[in-house]
């Protein structure tokens, strides 16, 4: 008969240590939303500030956008681009408020948003006015960098005087 040395591993079914697994207080979805909101809230606010006059409007727009994201988080997680869907909501919220008040830089923004497709206008505002890199703008809007570059190219051709934050 063969004998094997005794293993130091206890047999299955007998634990040498009590279980330490506890249900986490926050589930992964809540943590995911919290991280998303923490990362994007300041950048959403910068975008809204560039398009709106009153700080109260900026706060309301960002709060409404993040509230939408929190309420629809499960659905957003199943979408191809969560960031793109939340960005569309932010753009909608800002546009709604922008209709009610005069933007800070009326001529510049009027030229952007009346002459360009919204992706080009947003790309131009984020990159040329707010100083985000193409990669940062793309991530924020839920696009690939070539889409932002294409939007900037359209802006350069249609409104060359606005390139690199130039005067209208």
Image: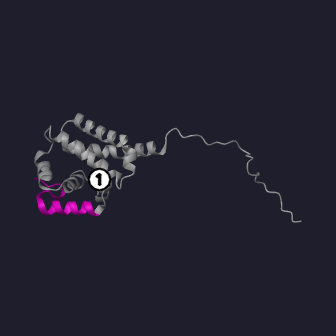
- What residue range appears in magenta? 146-168
Please state the horizontal and vertical placement of residue 71, each as a whole percent of the image.
Answer: 36, 40
Front in this rendered view, residue 69 or 52: 69
Please state the horizontal and vertical placement of residue 80, each as a whole percent of the image.
Answer: 35, 56
Q: Is residue 122 visible?
A: yes
Please state the horizontal and vertical placement of residue 8, each as a whole percent of the image.
Answer: 78, 54
Q: Is residue 81 above or below residue 48?
A: below
Residue found farthest to the right:
1
- Mark 1 residue crowding within 10 angstroms, few (<14) / some (14–19) / many (20+): many
Count of numbered marks: 1
Q: Is residue 124 above or below residue 72?
A: below
Q: Residue at 28% x, 54% y: name it.
A: 132
According to the image, label 1 marks what residue? 141
Q: Residue at 14% x, 40% y: name it.
A: 99
Q: Is residue 52 visible?
A: no
Residue 55 location, quadrant: top left
Give the main secondary structure of the magenta stretch: helix
Asked whether, in this view, residue 148 is left or right of residue 5, the answer is: left
Q: Is residue 78 above or below residue 145?
A: above
């Amino acid at each position: 008969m063969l004998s094997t040395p005794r293993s130091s591993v206890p047999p299955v079914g007998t634990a040498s240590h009590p279980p330490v697994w506890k249900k986490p207080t926050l589930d992964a979805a809540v943590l995911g939303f919290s991280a998303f909101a923490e990362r994007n809230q300041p950048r959403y606010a910068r975008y809204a500030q560039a398009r709106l006059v009153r700080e109260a409007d900026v706060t309301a727009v960002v709060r409404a956008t993040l509230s939408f994201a929190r309420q629809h988080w499960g659905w957003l997680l199943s979408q191809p681009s969560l960031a793109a869907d939340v960005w569309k909501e932010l753009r909608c919220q800002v546009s709604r408020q922008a209709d009610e008040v005069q933007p800070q830089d009326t001529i510049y923004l009027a030229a952007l948003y009346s002459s360009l497709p919204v992706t080009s206008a947003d790309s131009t505002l984020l990159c040329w006015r707010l100083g985000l890199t193409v990669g940062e703008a793309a991530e924020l809007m839920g696009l690939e960098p070539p889409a932002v570059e294409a939007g900037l190219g359209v802006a350069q051709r249609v409104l060359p005087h606005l390139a690199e934050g130039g005067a209208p």
